[in-house]
Image (cartoon, rainbow, N blue to C red):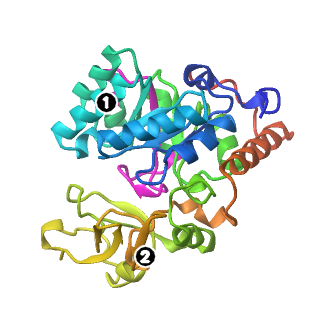
Amino acid sequence: MTSGEHGSLRTPLCDLLGCEVPILLAGMGGVSHWELAAAVATAGGYPILGMVREDPALIEAEVVALRAATDRPFAVNLIPAATKPDLLDAQITRCLDLGVGAFSFFWDPVPEAIQRVKAAGCLVLHQVGSLSAARAAEAAGSDVLIAQGIEAGGHVHGRIGALALAAELLQATRLPVAVSGGIVDGAGLAAALAMGAAGVHCGTAFLATDESFAHPYHKDRIVAASAADTVLTDVFVLNWPAGAAVRVIANSVTEALQGNYMGHDPDALPREAIAWDGEAPRLRFSTDSPLRTTTGNLEAMALYAGQGAGRIHDIVPAGVRLRRMADEAVALLARPGRMAAPKGGRG
């Protein structure tokens, strides 16, 4: 992609992050590995490596592999509020030793983690689900806010729509705001830019790509799903704090709940291995999703997907997905009477 092709989409967030179009790859744990990150970066977007609760040795291997594939900038996604302190310290230390220049954090803001990496000269992107979390992240020193709406796949922190939350944040903060949740195409990107957001943050759109580390079964289920096929539930909660809701494609586990999707106590759930990654068991009701390496009962695992799944109709290279989004957004924003052109977003 050349900068001239989609120059009308450029916002100050692109200058801050060092990308050509304001499309961010969500740091999906287990899925957003170096291959997918490199593909998004090469296509002009901004990649975030999904390294949630991973061993520092794996983080180093992923960073080294990504840098061998591209010299473009990237961030590493960690979740301080859901990671044991010793592991979090080791993760951040390894990233800083490797010269990682940006971090993406999620869930409740942990000021100590934000301030530590800021003191080392790093950028901080913080995904939030509420105005209060956004204010806490900004006060701790974050540089970019990612407004995650209830439409999003995977772990969902907030309970209002992405555009509604983004509108609140644009009024209440001076930071650049990227919109996350249900955005899989150029219409979503154009809507975000037209309202004054600085960009978008996409998970499901890139999960269903060739380079994604998700299992082909998971990708196929996304292609076949409609928006109505996803549910928000906290039954896939093992390994996470109680009440941590996720959006998944309905399966045998969610159907057995008979509509009682929320209020599950992880201590009351059985520990039953239903799949494996090598010798590592994957438990029913765990937060693990099926990866390329997973074998077993994939249907009963957490099949993460946002409500935008109904607009994903094929599995393509990540660069193709990104360029489709950008091309469509350019066309929509240029169409008389449809949308006002973006004015650069927040920066």
Q: Quadrant of residue 334?
A: top right
Mark drawn on residue 265: none
Q: Is 257 positioned to the left or the right of 171 in the image?
A: left
Where residue 89 appears, as percent x and y from the top left, is: 22, 32
Per the image, label 1 sits on a secondary structure element best described as helix
Name the residue at 59% across, 30% down.
Answer: 198
* Residue type, label 2: Leu
How many numbered marks does the figure carry? 2
Residue 321 position in % (x across, y down): 70, 51
Query: Is 291 within the magenta?
Result: no
Q: Which mark is residue 94?
A: 1
Residue drawn at x 53%, y 31% is 67
Q: Can residue 154 be found in the magenta stretch?
A: yes
Extreme-left residue of the structure: 267
Q: Quadrant of the N terminus?
A: top right
Q: Is residue 130 visible?
A: no
- In x, y percent, where is residue 324? 75, 49
Q: How far separated are the C-alphas under marks 1 and 2?
A: 33 Å
Segment tinted magenta in the rendering: 135-162
**Relative vertical location of residue 102 with respect to residue 251 in this rendering, above or below:** above
Q: Earlier in the sequence, mark 1 or mark 2?
A: 1
- One can see residue 58 in this view: yes
Residue named by callout 2: 298
